[in-house]
Image (tube, grey):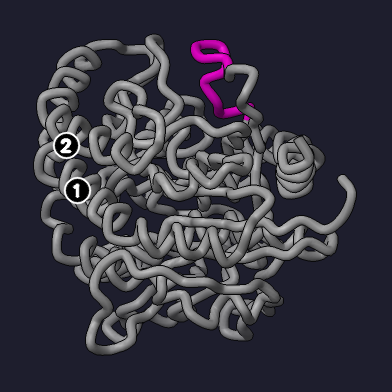
């Protein structure tokens, strides 16, 4: 590498992918490179505060009033939450395909903006963390890096469960039916998008895939939980066992959670993510159940935080520095988003997973079937099930030892700097 690079990051407008890009981008920025974010417009000001340049895009006509970061998807999740109560195969038509439709609509709308950004920024390398193709990013004449930080099953294989199903890896019952339903409900959408992508000058999409492979592909999932034996990664793929940002603010445990606990009182972190927490009814249900336990809880309350009251054994806020909190707790109750799941492995924390949508069913199933946690139905769990899972995982000293040892290995592999090294090498040709 002869000098500083200009690196353009294009993350999905959600906290998981954006935070992943922030973590990698921060390492590159501190190495002296120019890092520019082509983020969605609601992120305005959040990324410049971390030392990056912003050259923002709209995925739809701008709203009349300014929105919070990722507000579109928060509203979308809130309005479609009843769909999460259905079996995953039924969600393919009523939730998964509408999400693809929205993502595709955004890609079409912002294509001219992205072309203009590429012309202005003149990047040496482009990094996309998303699940849908933006042709301007792949036709810029510079190396294209794809990050898969959403779902380990996004990299498919004949011997793997179908993505979005949450089906077991060791039981193929239902796999063929699910794949057939996915094809039936998505073939037309994919074909129209593929036609549009090629008309923008990009190469055709792989069959039923909404994004191309890159010149470099970075795949975020810990080896200990991966499907390596069933689906080895190809030569153009590099696993990052974790990719945990170092930009979160420091965190001090609130005084109300530092004392007063009993001998059997653990410290637990509860988060349904920035999107899942928009389901206030569900948040209240989980909080009410946890209030009937002896433990102490840190609660990520999310965008509708004013509507969620916490009992005396809990403390929470709208936004929390999750990567600073996880090392302090004994266990995590999570929606199973890929960022939180991989961060729990990074810090060696067992999980109770309450999956709601998209990758979360697959992560929940993988955590449960490997014994790293318990999967529960977020809308149908009983107090006995949730409290029993807490007791089981908190009392499992062997699991705690296994996860602590695995976390040391994961952290030693230093995913952030590994990613930065690979991006530098790819840009240098």
Give the main secondary structure, helix, strand or loop, of the magenta stretch: loop
**Residue picked out by circle 2:** 189
Tags 2 and 1 touching, CB below 8 Å: yes
Say which of 141 and 314 sits in front: 141
Which residue corresponds to the image point at 89% horizontal and 49% vertical from the top-left?
2
On the image, the x and y values in percent for residue 149 come to 51, 44
Residue 36 shown left or right of residue 75 in the figure: right
Say which of 205 and 12 sits in front: 205
Residue 227 part of the magenta-drawn span: yes
Q: Residue furthest right?
A: 2
On the image, the x and y values in percent for residue 144 come to 58, 41
- Kindly indicate the quadrant of the structure image that contains residue 402: top right
Question: Which of the marked residues, 2 or 1, is nearer the chain's N terminus?
Answer: 1
Q: Which residues are magenta?
A: 223-232
Q: Residues within 10 Å of mark 2 (few under 14, many from 20)?
A: some
Say which of 289 and 378 sits in front: 378
On the image, the x and y values in percent for residue 182 come to 18, 27
45 relative to 425, above or below:
below
**Residue picked out by circle 1:** 101
Which type of secondary structure does the marked residue at label 2 adopt?
helix
Which type of secondary structure does the marked residue at label 1 adopt?
helix
On the image, the x and y values in percent for residue 164 come to 29, 34
């Amino acid at each position: 590498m002869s000098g500083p690079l200009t690196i353009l990051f294009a993350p999905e407008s959600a906290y998981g992918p954006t935070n992943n890009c922030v973590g990698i981008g921060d390492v590159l920025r501190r190495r002296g490179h120019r890092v520019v974010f082509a983020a969605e417009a609601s992120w305005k000001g959040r990324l410049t505060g971390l030392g990056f340049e912003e050259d923002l895009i709209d995925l739809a006509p701008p709203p009349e009033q300014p929105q919070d970061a990722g507000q579109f998807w928060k509203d979308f999740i809130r309005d479609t939450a009843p769909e999460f109560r259905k079996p995953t195969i039924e969600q393919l038509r009523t939730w998964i395909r509408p999400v693809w439709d929205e993502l595709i609509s955004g890609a079409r709308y912002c294509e001219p903006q992205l072309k203009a950004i590429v012309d202005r920024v003149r990047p040496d390398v482009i990094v996309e963390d998303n699940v849908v193709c933006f042709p301007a990013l792949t036709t810029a004449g510079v190396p294209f890096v794809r990050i898969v930080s959403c779902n380990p099953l996004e990299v498919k294989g004949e011997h793997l469960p179908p993505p979005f199903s949450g089906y077991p890896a060791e039981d193929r019952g239902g796999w063929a039916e699910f794949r057939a339903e996915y094809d039936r409900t998505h073939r037309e959408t994919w074909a129209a998008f593929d036609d549009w992508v090629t008309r923008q000058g990009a190469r055709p999409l792989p069959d039923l895939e909404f994004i191309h492979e890159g010149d470099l592909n970075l795949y975020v999932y810990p080896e200990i939980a991966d499907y390596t034996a069933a689906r080895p990664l190809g030569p153009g793929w590099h696993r990052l066992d974790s990719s945990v940002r170092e930009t979160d603010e420091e965190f001090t445990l609130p005084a109300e959670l530092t004392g007063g606990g009993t001998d059997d009182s653990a410290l637990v972190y509860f988060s349904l993510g920035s999107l899942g927490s928009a389901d206030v009814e569900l948040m209240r249900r989980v909080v009410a159940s946890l209030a009937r336990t002896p433990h102490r809880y840190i609660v990520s309350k999310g965008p509708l935080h004013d509507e969620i009251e916490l009992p005396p054994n809990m403390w929470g806020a709208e936004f929390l520095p999750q990567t600073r909190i996880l090392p302090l707790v004994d266990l995590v109750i999570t929606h199973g988003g890929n960022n939180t799941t991989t961060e729990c492995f990074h810090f060696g924390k067992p999980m109770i997973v309450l999956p709601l949508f998209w990758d979360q069913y697959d992560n929940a199933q993988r955590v449960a079937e490997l014994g790293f946690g318990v999967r529960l139905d977020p809308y149908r769990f009983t107090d006995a099930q949730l409290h029993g899972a807490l007791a089981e995982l908190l009392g499992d000293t062997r699991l705690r030892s296994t996860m602590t040892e695995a976390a040391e290995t994961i952290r030693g592999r230093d995913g952030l700097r590994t990613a930065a090294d690979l991006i530098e090498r790819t840009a240098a040709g």
